Image (cartoon, grey):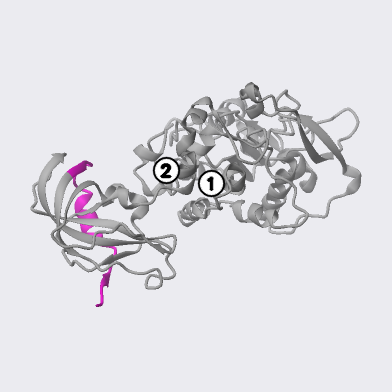
Amino acid sequence: MMVMVRLVPVLLATAALLEAESLELDGRLLQLTPAPTPAQVRPYPRCLATYLYEVGKVHHGSFEGRQILVAKWAVWERKSLPTLPTMVNTVERLTLQRFVDHPGLKTSRIVDGIGESELVLYYDPSSRPPPAVARALAPKASELESGVVVGESEGWLFLADELEHARQGRFWEKPWKESSCAGVDPLPALLDFQQRLQALGVELLIVPVPTKVSIYPDRLTDSLKPSEAPTEYLQILQHSGLRVLDLHPLFWDDREDPRHQSLYCAQDSHWTPRACQLAARAIYQTLTGADPPLPVNKFRKTSTRLIRGDLARMREDLSLGREHITLEEVSYPAGRNSHGYDHPASEIILLGDSSVAVFSDPLEGLHGPAAGLPDYLSCLRGQSMDIIASFGDGVHQARLNLYRERSRAGASYWENKSWVVWCFSMREFTRAEQWSSTIPVVTSTTD
């Protein structure tokens, strides 16, 4: 039997006029779309199918129609889902949301054999399998509350806030009020910042730092595999007109290298100097369009540092010893042992959270100096960059700091600028408290 494949634009446009509301109701299955197989929907890894129900008792919300059209996941990560309804006249208790309230689903593959074009489409969130990370974290509720989760690999710790982000899975396919602490889509704020910079002749490069669990899921639990979800979301941002450097493929490839050195500290929430080196080379190539120069040995020396990671300090009960970090330290001229933050005359601004400071800043707990992202990137470029770092908030407070500490200090600050490299943790897309579209870059009567 042939089925009709469509994205039901008329339904979505109609539903957009209605007030957002969840429904809980009894539904008797009237008609179903034969569930597609993974082979039938290639190359798509996921696919929804539609089901038509007669509406019985409404337990929550309001619904005036006699029939309701529901989309359920039929194929997930190239596997058929076994829990789909197959018997007409079966009565189900359904908890539904309007499809249009899940904007991340608007380009999803839908197999629709119902053909009821006048009905508003609803979505069954319970048909979506829970992310693997969410399943792995189910027995670790008390650890999540402590702020740090102990991995199955000896000595490996994970920041709970990062895992809360990871357990959302394909977070952009959910209503932002459910998946995000800020309750809003980050895209408008990202585009607003880019537009403000472009008005000054400055380009923006967004460099989200992969979460530790996205690169080392097996260190949390052996059953976890890397997920492509982060890369898919960053591709959405790229298709929206943003310049985004996705480090996930680079880091995954490095894990397969026989010479692999750890890209994340086991007992700290941050990346290692090795990851900073890889990121610096990728950023350099993106900014210049050229391969990075070969490292000059006289500017670097190999050493080992013993660190007490922030996660280990949060879990004093574990009595962990210090962690050994092997690194290449950038050698600076006599009397200057660190990159430093303040270089306002530089044409490039490195903006972000503690990811741009760790192993560079000699401040206690940041494990510097001379082996962080600013050091390696400056070494490749042959000149320093201006650093604006806001610890714990690389998306809102960092932009405020850029305006307050630089733009308001002098009108000439932006005259020679060419790039802002905005580097912050991937978890900020759901864990940031604010994604404001009203933060100024320069003083203006309209801001």
Residue 270 pos. (x, y %): 65, 36
From the viewer's perspective, tell me whether residue 259 is left or right of residue 73: right
**Residue 211 visible in the picture:** no
- Give the Cα separation between the discs numbered 2 and 1: 15 Å
Q: Which residue is mark 1?
A: 198
SS at badge 1 = helix
- When the figure is inspected, residue 255 is found, relative to residue 351, above or below; the finding is below
From the viewer's perspective, tell me whether residue 252 is left or right of residue 25: right
Camera-nearest residue between 442 and 422: 422
SS at badge 2 = helix
Amino acid marked by disc 1: Gln
Outermost residue, bottom side: 1
What is the magenta range?
A: 1-24
Camera-nearest residue between 283 and 67: 67
Circle 1 packing at 10 Å, graded few (<14), some (14-19), many (20+), is some
Residue 307 pos. (x, y %): 75, 29
Residue 116, image quadrant: bottom left
Residue 43 pos. (x, y %): 44, 69
Residue 266, image quadrant: top right
Instruction: State the residue at coordinates (72%, 33%).
Output: 343
Q: Which residue is mark 2?
A: 188
From the viewer's perspective, tell me whether residue 37 is left or right of residue 279: left
Camera-nearest residue between 167 and 28: 28
Magenta segment includes 8: yes
Residue 196 pos. (x, y %): 50, 41
Instruction: State the residue at coordinates (42%, 33%).
Output: 181
Q: Earlier in the sequence, mark 2 or mark 1?
A: 2
Magenta segment includes 109: no
Q: Are marks 2 and 1 in contact (CB under 8 Å)?
A: no
Instruction: State the residue at coordinates (21%, 60%).
Output: 51
Q: Quadrant of the N terminus?
A: bottom left
